[in-house]
Image (spheres, helix red, strand yellow):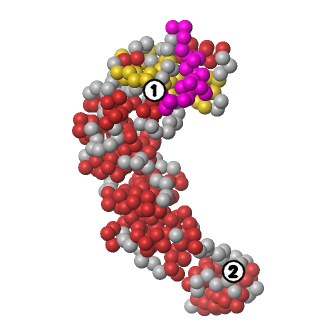
């Protein structure tokens, strides 16, 4: 075992809600440590999110101590040894140490234990198998400290066995590498993922969606997605052709514009060429309605946005609205390839910042005043008038609007006669 003291880089161990939980669970023959992602991020000098804690205490003892201290407890996964404690609005997942009795996928039979080594050995990656005790000491039972130093994502033990226990670990391997790794993926892990890719079909769409959307926005997404494609894993997940050039171009465009990484926008660049692609992805990943609508809009004739003049761009912005215009323009830029002029695309995408589409000013009353009765015809008239107004470049002065209304009414009457 390797240990290393944590100094001033974890002040939350000395005071605050996490320190109070550790103090509550330590003592009287029991021990508690911070585990998982919080430990990894502290050592990598990255922000930490949730703080998860492992303990030798059984769930009933965790609940008893919490109740005695006036702390709210929620049995969020008590069958698996997990109780959530809530302090000052912060949730802490407390899980009793476990060890595998039988392993058969995600439904492995486990038993509660008191052995920190065996608990660490059943986790996924070495950098996630570290723990920190309340005295600030890092406990390493799986070689995680060396892998933290090398920024290497490596399965604990036999990669094939770890994957067979839960095939989602294939996607987690690439996502964790994209977020925390450096260089090429660990070769032993990569080859095991390729060997195990058939198991991806057994995963629920919801679990795959969660991992894929997280992967899309990771700092090293391009290298990990490329490796997945080369290993035949993307086809197994997404079920269609993927476009690595546009994916890389989308990431570059976001960075050039100073935009935050956007998972749906990047997924569109990677896997959507036409609207049918968006519908396939929505089904395979069980995307939300909002995510599906965004991808569907991105895939709808995005090529028409390339090379537009200013007047045409205004009409597109008016029709699409700013969010959909922006998404579709970003996809068109990403797919423009080497012929793309970055300055020109920046200017086109910035149209909503320099021009705001006016509200269509003609109303049903304008046509009622011209002798038309209430009814379905009015809707058709307004559609024709709006098209003419757009073609005239959005005039707002009364004479121009009156002329558009007169011409539309005359055209409608003529069409009705024909």
The magenta stretch spans residue 74: no
The answer to which of 260 and 417 lies nearer the viewer is 260
Q: Considering the image in quadrants, where does the C terminus appear?
A: bottom right
| 262 in relation to 273, above or below | above
Q: Are marks 2 and 1 in contact (CB under 8 Å)?
A: no
Residue that protrudes farthest toward the front in the picture? 8
Residue 26 placement (x, y as % from top left): 54, 14
Residue nearest the viewer, comparing 331 with 339 = 339
Query: What's the magenta region?
Result: 6-29
Query: What residue sits right under mark 1 in the picture?
Result: 6
> On residue 362, which mark appears?
2
Report the mark closest to the observer, 2 or 1: 1
Taking 82 as reference, is 219 above or below it?
below
Q: Position of residue 315 (x, y in %)?
A: 54, 77
- Is residue 355 among the parts visible in the rendering? yes
Local secondary structure at mark 2: loop
Please tell me how crowded label 2 is: few (under 14), some (14-19), or many (20+) other residues with Cα within 10 Å.
some
Viewer-closest of 109 and 130:
130
Q: In the picture shown, does residue 410 fall above or below 276? A: below
Left or right: where 36 falls relative to 337: right
* Callout 1 crowding tier (Cα within 10 Å): few <14, some 14–19, many ≥20: some
């Amino acid at each position: 075992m390797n240990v290393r003291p944590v100094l001033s880089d974890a002040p939350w161990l000395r005071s605050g809600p996490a320190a109070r939980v550790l103090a509550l669970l330590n003592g009287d023959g029991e021990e508690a440590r911070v585990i998982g992602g919080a430990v990894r991020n502290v050592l990598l000098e990255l922000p930490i999110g949730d703080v998860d804690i492992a303990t030798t205490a059984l769930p009933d003892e965790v609940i008893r101590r919490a109740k005695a201290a006036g702390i709210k407890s929620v049995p969020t996964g008590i069958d698996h040894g997990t109780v959530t404690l809530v302090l000052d609005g912060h949730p802490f997942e407390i899980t009793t140490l476990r060890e595998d009795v039988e392993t058969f996928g995600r439904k492995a039979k486990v038993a509660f234990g008191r052995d920190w080594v065996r608990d660490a050995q059943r986790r996924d990656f070495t950098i996630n198998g570290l723990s920190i005790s309340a005295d600030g000491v890092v406990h390493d039972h799986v070689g995680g400290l060396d892998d933290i130093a090398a920024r290497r994502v490596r399965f604990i033990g036999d990669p094939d066995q770890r994957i067979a226990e839960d095939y989602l670990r294939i996607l987690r391997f690439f996502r964790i590498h994209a977020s925390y790794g450096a260089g090429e993926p660990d070769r032993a892990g990569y080859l095991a993922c390729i060997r195990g890719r058939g198991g991806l079909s057994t995963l629920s769409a919801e679990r795959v969606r969660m991992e894929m959307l997280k992967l899309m926005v990771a700092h090293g997404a391009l290298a990990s997605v490329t490796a997945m494609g080369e290993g035949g894993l993307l086809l197994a997940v997404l079920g269609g052709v993927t476009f690595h050039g546009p994916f890389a171009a989308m990431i570059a465009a976001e960075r050039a514009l100073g935009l935050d990484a956007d998972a749906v926008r990047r997924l569109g660049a990677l896997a959507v060429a036409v609207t049918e692609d968006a519908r396939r992805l929505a089904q395979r990943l069980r995307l939300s309605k909002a995510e599906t609508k965004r991808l569907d809009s991105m895939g709808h004739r995005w090529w028409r946005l390339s090379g537009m003049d200013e007047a045409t761009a205004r009409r597109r912005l008016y029709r699409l609205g700013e969010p959909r215009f922006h998404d579709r323009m970003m996809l068109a830029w990403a797919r423009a390839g080497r012929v793309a002029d970055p300055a020109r695309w920046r200017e086109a995408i910035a149209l909503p910042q320099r021009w705001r589409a006016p509200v269509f000013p003609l109303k049903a009353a304008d046509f009622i005043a011209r002798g038309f009765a209430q009814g379905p015809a009015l809707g058709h008239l307004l559609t024709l008038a709006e098209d003419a107004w757009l073609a005239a470049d959005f005039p707002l002065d009364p004479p121009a609007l009156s002329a558009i209304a007169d011409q539309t009414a005359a055209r409608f009457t003529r069409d009705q006669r024909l």
